[in-house]
């Protein structure tokens, strides 16, 4: 078993699809922790605001198997694979970081580059894993967040009650 960190995002029926996606994920893997949920403006296009959060899971599944599971969950939640890259999403789940893996693994770049680039990924990841180090440069993600220009992508924490997770499951 190893720890894997995933990023969730939605800007279409956000509460419904994020909760559904999380429930479907829990049927496949052991959920360890869930970050707070943050509202952020869409990036790269004009669209509705996104809700984003991160989770950590324990799994023995390969990156390729996990990627297939996440794609299936997105598809069940109505993900339009023909939509432009920068467009609205019912559900987007990304593999952000896999314990012990660096570089391209099964077609997934680890850690995912956008962890360091986007507040809506970096902040929730730091919330649940402040000890994580970026293997690309040896810095801690928490230090990257500390140095991040928070005016560039403002975040607003929103209630996570819609996820249906008990407070003891959510690590702060």
Image: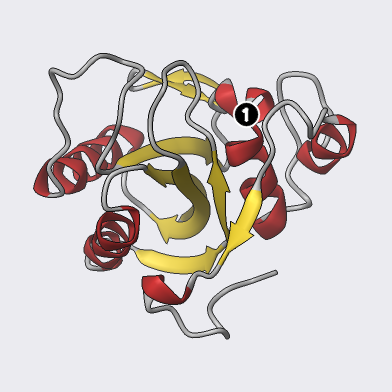
Q: Is residue 59 left or right of residue 74?
A: right
Is residue 102 among the parts visible in the rendering? no
- Residue 112 coordinates in the image, percent (x, y): 53, 26
Q: Secondary structure at mark 1?
A: loop
Is residue 122 among the parts visible in the rendering? yes
From the viewer's side, name the closer residue of 43 and 111.
43
Q: Residue at x 88, y 39 (%)?
A: 146
Q: Residue at x 26, y 53 (%)?
A: 13
- For the C terminus, give its image quadrant: bottom right
- Residue 156 coordinates in the image, percent (x, y): 64, 52
Q: Is residue 124 left or right of residue 95?
A: right
From the viewer's side, name the closer residue of 113 and 84.
84
What residue sits right under mark 1 in the picture?
118
- Residue 121 coordinates in the image, percent (x, y): 58, 38
From the viewer's side, name the closer residue of 130 and 118.
118
Q: Residue at x 14, y 29 (%)?
A: 80
Residue 48, by quadrant, is top left
Q: Is residue 127 left or right of residue 143?
A: left
Q: Residue at x 77, y 52 (%)?
A: 130
Picture mark count = 1
Q: Is residue 148 above or below residue 57?
A: above
- For the N terminus, give its image quadrant: bottom left
- Residue 129 coordinates in the image, percent (x, y): 69, 54
How would you rate the neighbour count of disc 1 (Cα within 10 Å): few for under 14, some for 14-19, many for 20 or more?
A: some
Q: Is residue 79 above or below residue 53?
A: above
């Amino acid at each position: 078993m190893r720890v894997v960190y995933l990023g969730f995002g939605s800007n279409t029926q956000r509460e419904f699809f994020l909760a559904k996606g999380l429930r479907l994920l829990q049927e496949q893997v052991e959920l360890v922790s869930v970050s707070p949920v943050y509202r952020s403006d869409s990036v790269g296009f004009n669209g509705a605001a996104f809700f984003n959060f991160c989770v950590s899971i324990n799994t023995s599944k390969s990156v390729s198997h996990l990627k297939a599971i996440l794609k299936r969950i997105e598809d069940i939640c109505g993900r339009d694979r023909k939509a432009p890259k920068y467009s609205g999403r019912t559900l987007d789940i990304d593999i952000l970081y896999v314990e012990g893996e660096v570089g391209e693994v099964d077609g997934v770049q680890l850690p995912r580059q956008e962890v360091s680039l986007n507040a809506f990924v970096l902040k929730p990841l730091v919330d649940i894993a402040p000890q994580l180090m970026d293997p690309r440069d040896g810095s801690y993600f928490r230090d990257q967040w500390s140095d991040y220009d928070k005016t560039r992508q403002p975040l607003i924490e929103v209630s996570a009650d819609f996820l249906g997770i008990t407070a003891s499951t959510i690590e702060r």
